[in-house]
């Protein structure tokens, strides 16, 4: 499957650390953004399909570069799953590129049109943001997702990946550059910055060259960007996700939903962190989690009532919950459990501890379901389903840059449709204002 490539093995030309400043790279990307903004829709779509072909042809090399990154990370580190690329995931990335290519171009749409009394013809049009900066950790899939979404929407992008994924990111950006060259577009449209952290502050203050910053990673990374960025920021927040098992719930469905939300991929932001279970069914329901959780050695941090029930059920990995175990994003085979006395108590707990990412209720009472869905303030709320569905590709958005937990501009999967802003275009025939 390996074919000749111009990509330098793990050492992309833009990923050196000896330079004094990244301003030259940022300037180049800003200039490239003009070319991308004016590139025809069909060309952008064809470029992404070309990139998908290259990704599949070079799968063996991608796996080899990714293995170099994996070899440097402790097997016990929960971020290792985020770092991992395998054949299935690479095929999925290529498919995602093709899906984004099929999506309609979000730019050029006329959002409003009217003629003013002075005879001026006015239009409000969706246009590209310009230069999108993304700071992220561990996940090389983000490299392709961000590049695809930005190019498809007429944006250029600046990528600041973590050193833990440097071999994978460098090789993938090299493939992106090959596709850009094939379509006679500037490589600087997708810029991979050096991994050295000293350049982060320079990126966060580059208001002349970067139009928006999107952090994707740990809560500490997100808070650092929020507190230090002079460039407008859209948060893709940490996911502290709850599932409330209400007393009328179908407990077999509840068991499947809770287990799936926790163990299917615990290192991602839409995985379950806290189970809230109604006191009426706690004694029956909690022991049913034993087999599914034990298969993955899930460690449970339980409040006093839940601890007593699970202790009686001989659950082995059991810890008395401390206050800080609620509102905690575990990103591992760990979760907290709390027994509550009904919907008001469950809503109060979620209000206090939720990160506003994804929240779920399992219930057969439609009035209670509706109250939960109306009351909970989160980007995605679920009734009788796993929070693991919060994902751009699952929502038929092609891919995502992250899940936005804030309320300005975008909320939920930050995908193609949100990588635009507005421009007012006014056409006249010599009018002057009196």
Image (cartoon, rainbow, N blue to C red):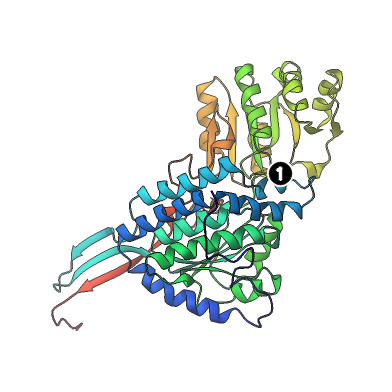
Near-viewer residue (66 or 388): 66
Front in this rendered view, residue 374 or 110: 110
Does residue 272 appear to the left or right of 39 in the view shown? right
Q: Quadrant of residue 241?
A: top right
Q: Quadrant of the C terminus?
A: bottom left
Q: Would you name the residue on which mark 1 appears?
A: 331
- Secondary structure state at the residue bearing disc 1: loop
x 76%, y 55%: residue: 72
Q: Would you identify the image quadrant in which residue 125 lies?
A: bottom left
Above or below, 307 relative to 327:
above
Instruction: State the residue at coordinates (49%, 59%).
Output: 147
Crowding at dot 1, Cα within 10 Å, few <14 / some 14-19 / many 20+, comes out as: many
As displayed, is residue 159 above or below residue 287?
below
Position in image of residue 174 (x %, y %): 54, 64
Q: Is residue 255 left or right of residue 149?
A: right
Q: Nearer the viewer, residue 289 or 406?
A: 289
């Amino acid at each position: 499957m390996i074919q000749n490539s111009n990509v330098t093995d793990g050492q992309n030309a833009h990923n050196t650390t000896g330079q004094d400043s990244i301003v030259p790279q940022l300037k180049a990307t800003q200039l490239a953004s003009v070319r991308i903004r004016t590139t025809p829709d069909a060309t952008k779509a064809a470029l992404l399909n070309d990139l998908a072909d290259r990704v599949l042809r070079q799968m063996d090399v991608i796996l080899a570069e990714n293995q170099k990154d994996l070899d440097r990370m402790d097997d016990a580190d929960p971020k290792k799953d985020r770092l991992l690329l395998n054949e299935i995931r690479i095929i999925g990335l290529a498919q995602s590129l093709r899906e984004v290519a099929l999506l309609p171009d979000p730019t050029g749409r006329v959002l409003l049109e009217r003629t003013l009394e002075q005879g001026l013809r006015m239009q409000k049009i969706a246009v590209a943001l310009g230069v999108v900066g993304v700071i992220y950790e561990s996940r090389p899939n983000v490299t392709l997702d961000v590049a695809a979404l930005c190019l498809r929407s007429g944006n250029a992008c600046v990528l600041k990946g973590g050193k833990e994924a440097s071999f994978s990111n460098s090789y993938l950006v090299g493939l992106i550059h090959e596709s850009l060259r094939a379509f006679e577009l500037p490589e600087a449209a997708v810029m991979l910055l050096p991994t050295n952290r000293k350049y982060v502050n320079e990126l966060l203050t580059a208001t002349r060259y970067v139009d928006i910053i999107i952090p994707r990673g740990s809560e500490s990374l997100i808070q650092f960007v929020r507190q230090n960025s002079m460039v407008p920021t859209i948060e893709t927040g940490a996911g502290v996700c709850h599932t409330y098992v209400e007393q009328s719930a179908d407990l077999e469905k509840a068991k499947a939903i809770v287990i799936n939300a926790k163990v299917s991929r615990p290192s991602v932001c839409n995985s379950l962190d806290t189970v809230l279970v109604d006191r009426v069914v706690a004694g029956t329901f909690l022991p049913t989690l034993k087999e599914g959780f034990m298969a993955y050695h899930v460690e449970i941090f339980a409040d006093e009532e839940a601890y007593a029930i699970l202790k009686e059920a001989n659950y082995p990995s059991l810890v008395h919950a401390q206050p800080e175990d609620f509102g905690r994003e575990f990103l591992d085979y760990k979760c907290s459990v709390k027994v509550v006395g009904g919907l008001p108590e469950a809503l109060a707990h979620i209000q206090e501890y939720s990160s506003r990412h994804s929240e779920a209720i399992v219930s057969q009472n439609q009035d209670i379901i509706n109250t939960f869905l109306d009351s909970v303030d989160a980007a995605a709320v679920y009734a009788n389903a796993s929070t693991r569905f919060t994902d751009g590709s699952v929502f038929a958005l092609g891919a995502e840059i992250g899940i936005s937990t804030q309320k300005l501009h975008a909320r939920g999967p930050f995908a193609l449709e949100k990588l635009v802003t507005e421009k007012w275009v006014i056409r006249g025939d010599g009018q002057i204002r009196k």
